[in-house]
């Protein structure tokens, strides 16, 4: 029966898609298409109206685009090694990828969220989650570099993350997979009732953005899929969608889809914060990494932490409730006013909208429909504000334009549907190419959205671009939503798999974007701030080369006295103080990537020479008219040789 | 007359002259402000970056204040001229000296100004033509003579990929305004003198 239903669903989806296609073709003709071109055309030398930060999914990194042009500006390395800059390869950045499992060169980056003040984007930082080995990273929106990564213990599949509360009090990270807490050797079949779902509340220092894992709420062993903060009246609450309330542990696609309704978990984090501040909670031994990058030493430091404060939600009165929500909800989105919590039941056609006011009322009147592991379940009818009869299939995620409208993606029927808050009436629908996951409106997850464009991030690309073999980049579409009807205006390839994105007006960030690092603020222990300090020092078989660069030479550029078996550290300081003049460094036969050193910065590259000879190194960035001349030699002698260390520049 | 010389105080704060260098790669142009006591970048690292570019064509680095006697002498000369000007102004107000002293101050200041410009130009000639024989890039004019890089004293010129514009800056304009005020003071003094001289005659005719 289930199968037949699914088949029928697919046919409906196909029909909707075909209908959508026709629509698209019709509106793609004549005057309309030329106006689309005008809308996305950003002339050479002009700049975009919005920044868009698209998650890179399995690329592990964050990409920066311009809207409406769809031009990619930068890939910011976060969880993955990145040879372009040497991130994760340089000695300074290796600690950023340290975890309790050791060095991990990769993660799956899903959901970016920009810091907020009073529920509006403030453009200080962007937070992102690593899904696979649970981590949260903070990226500076001044340097556009990763400044901090914190690992989340007791979590697995860090998916309902990284979402920011209204004043960036917390970045919230929920576990998708429930696991034994603490981890232990036990039968998988004993999942039900034994596994736990940890929801982590990471406080953010308002001055410097530093993160601290303040407490974890240990929830029943469901899957916590996505989450969003309350805002306005609902500030202080956080809402998580769940699936697998069946607590199945195998053939999940069937066994976790049996309950007609799963839950949206409503967490009153202010209550729990108060409980914790008054000494509540249980300290638990654990092990997780906290990695911080210092902009002045240009160096990351990894510290292992060994304790976390856990909270049993049943011990905190009136703090946690379950809102029944149909069909394994994925998206769990809160409208700009904070009143409506939208649950997108991904196996259904409809959206369920809960009312925050009704929820408070139901709690006050104790209108419970039983409980799950001691957590009260509210009556569906008492909290539900309305249902959007969408006519689509597979709703995933909703954002808002700030003008009373909501926009929901439908994965199965491959479309974006615009509907009105309050009346729950569908206003417009447009196809996506193909199978859209999330969408993004700049500021869409805040009190103040900038409702001009929707970016739909699709899971399937197929024929949208020239074919490039079986593997290709995912497609995204931009819709103009300034009118009553959405208009598809552009189609562009993304990088990796964007799951979600965050956007903001260009002027919020552009003027703060840093141009250089000041050499006089460089506190790197191996920096040379004057070429006269350049030198080579040996300590046993470890050699430190203190090197400086300026257009167009390395100081020193001739080095002798290195021996096979040495560990040679090139500490390179870029003495430029001019915008956009990096120097690179690479050494022949080096078992690592090049490094790219920004003006005023120091980076370190390790070389372990294995062969006798005279080996060249060079600048990898076309820095100047004499870039090709920016090179040098290192003489490597046998391990037994007695050649003294010597170094020079410009001597005969 | 007192206000005019005081305008020269602006030279201690604002640059006398500004030379801007723009190029395709420098949409935000590099610039140097010439103060009476030294050369400073328009933006913090401009001097370093101009020197960095100039080393390719063998130009010397821009002089630091202690490397040119002008930067220690000019502030003293200007200070003396301000003092003299104000003194003449006060004495003129008290009718101890006559208005012709105003013109005298202006003439002396103008001569000093021309000498200063001559000196500045001479430095720029040296800076732009006295090149390192081992320069990385040795460029020649179409007629075969070595290319030189003297910035213009006033106005715009094209040097390789750079558009170089040299114009008086805030301090310079304040100085010119101040000097003109002394001329105005002279003219007013002269007119008053004529009026006073005429008055007795008017009395006679009535």
Image: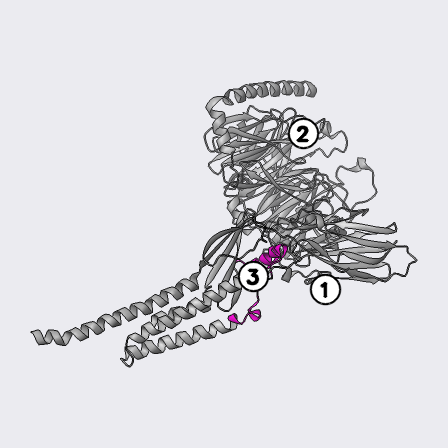
Q: Please give the range of residues in magenta.
A: B42-70
Residue in front for this viewpoint, A651 or B118:
B118
Residue B4 is left or right of residue A10, and the answer is left
Q: Earlier in the sequence, mark 2 or mark 1?
A: 2
Residue B163, image x, y percentages:
51, 50
Q: CA distance from mark 3 to mark 1?
A: 29 Å
Whether residue A311 is visible: no
Q: Tell me the mark number nearer the camera, choosing from 2 and 3.
A: 3
Task: Identify the residue at image location x=68%, y=59%.
Answer: A297
Task: Identify the residue at image location x=57%, y=24%.
Answer: A392
Q: Secondary structure at mark 1?
A: helix
Crowding near the residue tagged with mark 2, few <14, some 14–19, many ≥20 C-alpha atoms within 10 Å: some
Q: How is the image coloured?
A: one colour
Residue in front for this viewpoint, A401 or A605:
A605
Q: Report the quarter where the N terminus of chain A lies.
A: top right
Query: Can you identify the residue that label 3 sits on?
Result: B127
Q: CA distance from mark 2 to mark 1?
A: 70 Å
Q: Is residue B164 located in the magenta-colored stretch of the structure?
A: no
Chain for numbered disc 1: A
Q: Secondary structure at mark 2?
A: loop
Query: Can you identify the residue that label 1 sits on?
Result: A533
Residue A222, image x, y percentages:
70, 37
Up the image or down, A47 lies above or below B133; here it is above
Q: Write down the quadrant of residue A411 in the picture.
A: top right
Residue A312, image x, y percentages:
69, 48
Up the image or down, A77 lies above or below A403; here it is below
Q: Tell me the mark number nearer the camera, choosing from 2 and 1.
A: 1
Residue B84, image x, y percentages:
38, 77
What's the mark number on residue A259? 2
Q: Report the quarter where the C terminus of chain A lies.
A: bottom right
């Amino acid at each position: 029966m289930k199968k037949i239903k699914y088949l029928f669903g697919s046919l409906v989806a196909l029909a909707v898609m075909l209908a959508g296609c026709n629509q698209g073709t019709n509106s793609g003709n004549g005057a309309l298409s030329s106006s689309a071109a005008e809308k996305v055309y950003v002339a050479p030398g002009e700049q975009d109206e919005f920044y868009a930060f698209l998650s890179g999914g399995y690329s592990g990194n964050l990409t920066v685009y311009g809207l409406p042009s769809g031009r990619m500006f930068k890939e910011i390395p976060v969880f993955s090694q990145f040879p372009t800059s040497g991130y994760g390869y340089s000695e300074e950045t290796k600690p950023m990828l340290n975890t309790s499992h050791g060095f991990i060169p990769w993660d799956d980056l899903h959901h970016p969220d920009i810091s907020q003040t009073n529920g509006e984007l403030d453009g200080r930082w962007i937070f992102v989650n690593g899904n696979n080995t649970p981590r949260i990273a903070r990226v500076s929106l001044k340097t556009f570099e990763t400044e901090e990564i914190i690992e989340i213990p007791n979590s697995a599949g860090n998916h309902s993350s990284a979402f920011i509360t209204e004043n960036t009090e917390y970045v919230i990270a929920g576990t998708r997979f429930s696991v034994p807490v603490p981890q232990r050797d036990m039968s998988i079949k004993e999942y039900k009732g034994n596994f736990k779902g940890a929801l982590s509340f990471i406080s953010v220092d308002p001055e410097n953005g530093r993160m601290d894992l303040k407490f974890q709420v240990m929830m029943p062993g469901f899957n916590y899929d996505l989450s969003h903060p309350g805002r306005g009246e609902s500030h202080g609450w956080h809402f998580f969608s769940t699936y697998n309330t069946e607590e199945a542990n195998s053939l999940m696609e069937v066994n976790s889809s049996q309950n007609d309704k799963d839950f949206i978990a409503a967490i009153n984090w202010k209550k729990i914060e108060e409980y914790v501040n008054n000494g509540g909670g249980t300290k638990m031994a654990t092990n997780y990494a906290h990695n911080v990058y210092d902009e002045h030493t240009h160096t990351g430091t990894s510290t292992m932490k060994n304790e976390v404060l856990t909270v049993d939600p049943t011990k905190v009165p009136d703090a946690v409730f379950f809102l029944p929500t149909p069909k394994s909800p994925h998206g769990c989105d809160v409208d700009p006013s904070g009143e409506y919590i939208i649950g997108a039941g991904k196996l259904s056609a409809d959206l369920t909208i809960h009312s925050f006011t009704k929820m408070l009322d139901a709690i006050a009147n104790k209108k419970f429909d039983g409980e799950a592991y001691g957590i009260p379940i509210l009556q569906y009818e008492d909290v539900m504000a309305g249902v959007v009869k969408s006519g689509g299939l597979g709703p995933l995620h909703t954002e808002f334009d700030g003008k009373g409208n909501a926009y929901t993606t439908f994965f199965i029927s491959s479309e974006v549907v615009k509907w009105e808050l309050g009346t729950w009436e569908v206003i417009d629908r447009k196809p996506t190419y193909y199978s859209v996951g999330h969408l993004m409106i700049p500021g869409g997850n805040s009190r103040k959205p900038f409702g001009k464009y929707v970016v739909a991030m699709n899971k399937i690309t197929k024929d949208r671009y020239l074919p490039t073999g079986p593997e290709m980049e995912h497609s995204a579409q931009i819709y103009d939503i300034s009118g009553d009807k959405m208009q598809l205006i552009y189609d562009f390839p993304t990088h990796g798999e964007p799951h979600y994105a965050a956007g903001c007006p260009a002027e919020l960030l552009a003027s703060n974007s840093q141009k250089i690092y000041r050499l006089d603020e460089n506190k790197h222990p191996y920096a040379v701030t004057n070429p006269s300090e350049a030198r080579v020092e040996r300590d046993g078989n470890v050699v430190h080369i203190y090197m400086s660069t300026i257009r167009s030479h390395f100081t020193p550029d001739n080095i002798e006295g290195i021996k096979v078996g040495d560990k040679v550290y090139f500490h390179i300081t870029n003495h430029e103080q001019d915008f956009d003049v990096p120097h690179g460094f690479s050494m022949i036969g080096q078992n690592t990537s090049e490094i790219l050193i920004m003006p005023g910065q120091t980076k370190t590259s390790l070389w372990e020479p294995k062969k006798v000879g005279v080996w060249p190194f060079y600048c990898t960035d076309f820095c100047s008219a004499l870039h090709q001349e920016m090179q040098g030699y290192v003489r490597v002698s046998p391990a037994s040789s007695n050649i003294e260390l010597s170094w020079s520049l410009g001597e005969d | 007359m007192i206000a005019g010389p005081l305008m020269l105080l602006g030279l201690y704060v604002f640059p006398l002259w500004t030379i801007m260098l723009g190029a395709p790669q420098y949409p935000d142009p590099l610039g140097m402000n010439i103060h009476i006591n030294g050369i400073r970048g328009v933006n913090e690292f401009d001097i370093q970056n101009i020197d960095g570019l100039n080393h390719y064509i063998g130009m010397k680095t821009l002089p630091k204040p202690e490397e040119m006697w002008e930067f220690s002498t000019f502030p003293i000369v200007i200070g003396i001229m301000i003092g003299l000007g104000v003194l003449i102004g006060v004495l003129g107000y008290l009718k101890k000296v006559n208005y012709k002293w105003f013109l005298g101050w202006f003439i002396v200041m103008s001569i000093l100004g021309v000498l200063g410009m001559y000196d500045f130009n001479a430095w720029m000639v040296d800076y732009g033509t006295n090149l390192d024989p081992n320069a990385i890039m040795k460029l020649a004019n179409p007629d075969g003579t070595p290319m030189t890089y003297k910035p213009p004293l006033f106005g715009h010129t094209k040097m390789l990929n750079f558009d170089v514009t040299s114009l008086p800056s805030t301090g310079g304009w304040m100085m010119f305004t101040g000097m003109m005020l002394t001329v105005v003071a002279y003219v007013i003094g002269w007119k008053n003198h004529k009026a006073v001289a005429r008055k007795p005659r008017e009395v006679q005719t009535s």
